Image: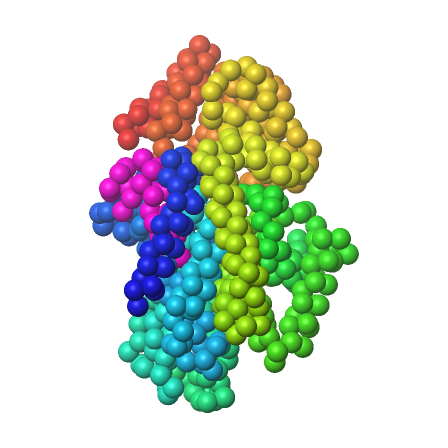
Amino acid sequence: MRWRWIASLAVAVLTAIGFAPAVTGSFLNWDDNVNFLENLSYRGLGPSQVRWAFTSTLFGHYIPLTRLSWCINYALGGLNPAGYHLLNVLLHAGNAVLFFFVVRRLLAAATAGGGQEGRRALEISAAAAVAALVFGLHPLRVEPVAWISGRADVLCGTFALLATWAYLKAVEANGAARPGLVLAAAAGLAAAILSKGSALPLPAALLLLDVYPLRRLHRLGAWTLVREKLPLLLVALAGTLTVALALRHGAVLTGSRDYGLLARVTVAAYSFVVYPLRFVWPSSLSPLYEMPARVSPFELKFGLGLLACVIVTALLVGLRRRWPAGLAAWTFSALLLAPTSAAIRLGTDLAPDRYSYLSGLSLAALAGGGALAGIRLVQGGRLSRATGRMAALAALVVIAGFGVISWSFADVWRQSETLWRWAVEVDPTCSICHGKLGESVLEGPSGPARLVEAEQLFRRAIALRPDLPDAYFNLGTTLVVQGRYTEAEDPLRIYMTRVPQAPAGPERLGLLYALEHRYEAAIPLLREALARKGDTPTLRGYLVEALRGRARELSAEGNATEADRLLAEARTLEGR
């Protein structure tokens, strides 16, 4: 018992140390600006903020518990990003500890015919600590931990692990599950889904654990296993309906005409393969892996991914009797990736690192299983102690290497500009990365050279992906700032045609016309932007100035009636 708690404390401390640079990070121009800097709705813990947390479907995500945690952060520390980052790091360190206790039971079950308490508790605790550190310190964890908006994955992981631990407690005896603990697991699942919908496949994952390593299928039968999970299945069903409704109301989904069924299956298979590859070799990780304009199974990386997915699945099925853990881990990973795979939802990001937060648990558990197998080979005399020490040293070096890489990568995530310079270096063909770097340059220290650099980055982004709209808007904005109004009009109009419902287009073009004293053209655009965006002081101020400017022109032309009408509209807007 004492070693168990010492190991769990070590896991927590080492994991927190590995992500310490993140605590000094800032809000990033990667959703953080929308979620926090521009968002007044979450600021506090009053009834309106709680109502917002439980009704918002921004970006198509229904994540009320995550948003409520942001409200708590604001209530405690306002807009100081340190508190938000600290909570992310603490939650992740806690998740590593929860995983330690979960994987300890699973390793015991794998070596004891399904029983969750092995007689050699010290060896199992040591192997579980290896698995927890591999999970906790792995560089794939940097994105959800070092990015404040990534908290949804971390908080979802907290409740999903709690639900799994409660379920394992419920079935630790040889008979049927204990109903009270199954209900506790269902409550944990509900909280996980309300943090992020990626926990939806958890009931299926628990059924998989029943097959291996718990080996309950042969003892109790499939119907009993399904029936005892009815509370979990009902929660998952309700969660599926809620997530689907949120996607319908808040998300921009890629239609089937843009990516057909074959392309979606291809990208899903690619994602099932690429995460284990990144787990084994976490090199050149990026905040964004850009979705290509077209996906074909005949393209090299997608074709290889599809082929590898089929081959690995076939091999693991063939080895299921000799190595059931391999097939279980592979299936678990694919199950937990399902809600976020491109087979269901396609966006601008192809297989982002944060999606591996839950699916990567099974791969870390395999590492713990390997550590336990090595320990028992040494104890059984089939492996010399010298070889065992060398293997243990190698494992420590790998884990320490993960920690060093995570520390360095977390430092990259501290500022928007360093993050996107890294992303452009990793993938020079990423259009969105160039655009985001251009935004970061504009947000940083001002100066003519910085404006020129931003303009070049936006033009490069457009050259790489002419179909993506944001770079046109940013290029137009940069040209406006430089006073090059005539040049700015064309990219702003292109943006408006690409995103016809967005308020930013008419707002920026209306401002451009106002700066050129083309008030008659500016006014309808600014009115349109105000109607779409809602009342904001800045936008209202632009419209007031345009109305007054046009009124002066009309007065000079002798049209006092129309001038008075516009001035009355301006006074009404000022009085809001």
Residue extending farthest to the top is 556
Q: Position of residue 108 (x, y in %)?
A: 43, 74
Q: The N terminus appears in which quarter of the rendering? A: bottom left
Query: Does the magenta segment cover residue 85?
Result: yes
Q: Position of residue 409 (x, y in %)?
A: 50, 40
Instruction: Tally the numbered discs.
Output: 0
Residue that appears at 31% across and 72% down: 184
- 245 lies above or below 166: above
Q: Which residues are magenta?
A: 72-96
- 26 lies above or below 50: above
The answer to which quarter of the image holds residue 166 is bottom left
Q: Nearer the viewer, residue 304 or 373?
A: 373
Q: Nearer the viewer, residue 16 or 383?
A: 383
The answer to which quarter of the image holds residue 313 is bottom right
Regarding residue 143, the answer to whether it shows in the image is no
Q: Position of residue 232 (x, y in %)?
A: 39, 74
Query: Does the magenta segment cover residue 351?
Result: no
Question: Could you tell me what secondary structure mostly forms the magenta stretch?
Answer: helix
- Colouring style: rainbow
Q: Position of residue 177 (x, y in %)?
A: 36, 82
Horizontal side of 92 relative to 484 (left or right) equals: left
Horizontal side of 381 relative to 107 (left or right) equals: right
Residue that appears at 52% across and 54% down: 393
- 123 lies above or below 347: below
Q: Nearer the viewer, residue 505 or 263?
A: 263
Residue that appears at 27% across and 47% down: 72
Q: Nearer the viewer, residue 469 or 520?
A: 469
Regarding residue 313, the answer to whether it shows in the image is yes
Residue extending farthest to the left is 46
Q: The C terminus appears in which quarter of the rendering? A: top left
